[in-house]
Image (spheres, grey):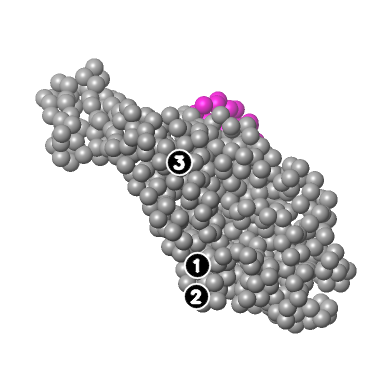
Amino acid sequence: MIRSQVLICGGTGCTSSGSKAVREAFESEIVKQDLAEEVKIVPTGCFGLCEKGPVVIVYPEGTFYSHVQAEDVAEIVEEHLLKGRIVQRLVYDEVDEDEVTLTEEIKNEVRQISLNETAFYKAQKRVALRNCGVINPESIDEYIAMDGYAALGKVLTEMTPEDVIKCISDSGLRGRGGGGFPTGRKWSFTAANKADQKYVVCNADEGDPGAFMDRSVLEGDPHCVLEAMAICGYATGASEGYIYVRAEYPIAVKRLQIAIEQAKEYGLLGENIFDSGFNFDIHIRLGAGAFVCGEETALMTSIEGNRGEPRPRPPYPAVKGLFAKPTTENNVETFANVPQIILRGADWFASMGTERSKGTKVFALGGKITNTGLVEIPMGTTLREVIEDIGGGIPNGKKFKAAQTGGPSGGCIPASLIDTPIDYDNLIEMGCMMGSGGLIVMDEDNCMVDIAKFFLDFTVDESCGKCAPCRIGTMRMKEILEKITSGNGTLEDIDKLEELAMHVKENSLCGLGQTAPNPVLATLKFFREEYIAHVVDKKCPAGVCKALLNYSIDPEKCKGCTKCARNCPVGAISGKVKEPHVIDTTKCIKCGACIDNCNFGAVVKG
């Protein structure tokens, strides 16, 4: 009889940190200690708290072990699973013992909190991620045990296609992949068009830098996407589906393949599902990493075997989409919400969030933040709650400066707007967008002009080149930003940059070009003074742009230890032992080695 379960994260993040070796060590040690009949090892998807990986959870206690390595496993098995004693040194601890003096009793109480009681999790509401980190994603039986495929069964035996579309419409679910178009309305457009063949497409081409929401759902709960696509197929009259997933996601691809095979074996995909007469099959197509293929028409063009380039709209995919047939396209997170809406009702979903942005949103939290990872919050949660409560604040005592939402298509939310509720309309009003859900946190050491240049570098490389505003306009914008960050910009360049950004936004063919100027426009709106400092004062306030930096040594602080001089790669530092040193700015290449090697804070960058 199983008395304990050991859940081991098998998502990409923890896998890269060694979770596969941890799992193998557990399997070996369990056999060695003759516990195979009592302890079950369960590989799962992402738990969310990626910074703490590899993560291991032991049930029924719910003990949350973090940073577990293969060499720690024997101790966990011996102490915890065999003797019932928690291995305190490996338990996730939210309290900084350097700052707080705790009695041993309080210390143990803090260290034994369960996963859901941590500050990172207790403010979250998991809908799309409900099964991630909970079930074995390669087991259809575990998915079924969590009400898996019950929504599909309900739809096929109790509801008409019109009932399904009404339920999704009434829930207020909007597309989680970018623009936030109402999902029910999109489904209704496809349903209204008569054709001998219709398709459902799942967009899993997650291309934003720092974004990994869709990947984590596919790795941790692939069956929920298959179930939702089948529901969409029934509602819209489609009999065939395609999942377009990045080839760089091998774990997600493998688990999707396993899930499709299992669903077919159980009669949950294929012909006459639930004896309803409804047929639906799903295929996987691998993307080659082109960012533009996240745009729905470019994605469909790629599935057809052509170069991924966007098509003019109209006609829209609901009329003429994949293989010129009516097609419904949604992203992974959008589909992940569908089964729960069907089972729990439209009113349940609509009770979460704000008036025009219902439900929850998954964000990949990264950058200058203590708790990097995956979070799912109700729409309307403030940015402050995400950063300070869930994210644990900015490390090293630095000040929050801005948060980048929506990746290369988004904008920056400044510190002055940290209490703004996060939803579709508020972000658009600020000149940002929800996008797929990347949330990159920046502190006082980030240069906002450099951030804008970084994202322009990305979009210039990823532009398919089909339309001139995007192909040429983004390159000209990048050149102006390079001119400004190199210290050669003028005030006229700032005006020209803003004018060009608006032109590209208004005249590009697809979403890539239309949103590419957003990082520039947002930083100009909220951080124009940094642009002015670059062109007027020839200074980078954050000390990032190399061409505008000068290194010097404070003679009051310099002890003459010679360490900076010994580590300077170009011999730009001179001085005698125990006497203040000097940097020759004509030789200095601004590499920062002097700062890194100074133990007295004598080197000044400015």
Residue at the spot of label 3: 498
Q: Mark 3–mark 2 contact, CB under 8 Å? A: no
Of residues 330 and 28, which is closer to you in this image?
330
Q: Nearer the viewer, mark 3 or mark 1?
A: 3
Q: What residue type is labelled 3?
A: Glu
| Residue at 53% in and 34% down | 414
Which residues, given as a range, are shown in magenta? Answer: 94-109
User: Upstream in the sequence, badge 3 or badge 1?
Assistant: 1
| Residue at 42% in and 52% down | 473
| Residue at 51% in and 77% down | 305
Residue at the spot of label 2: 306
Residue at the spot of label 1: 309
- Left or right: 100, with 155 as reference point: left
Secondary element at tag 3 = helix
Q: Mark 2–mark 1 contact, CB under 8 Å? A: yes
Q: What residue type is labelled 1?
A: Glu
Secondary element at tag 1 = loop
| Residue at 79% in and 48% down | 350
Residue 20 at x, y percent in the picture: 50, 62
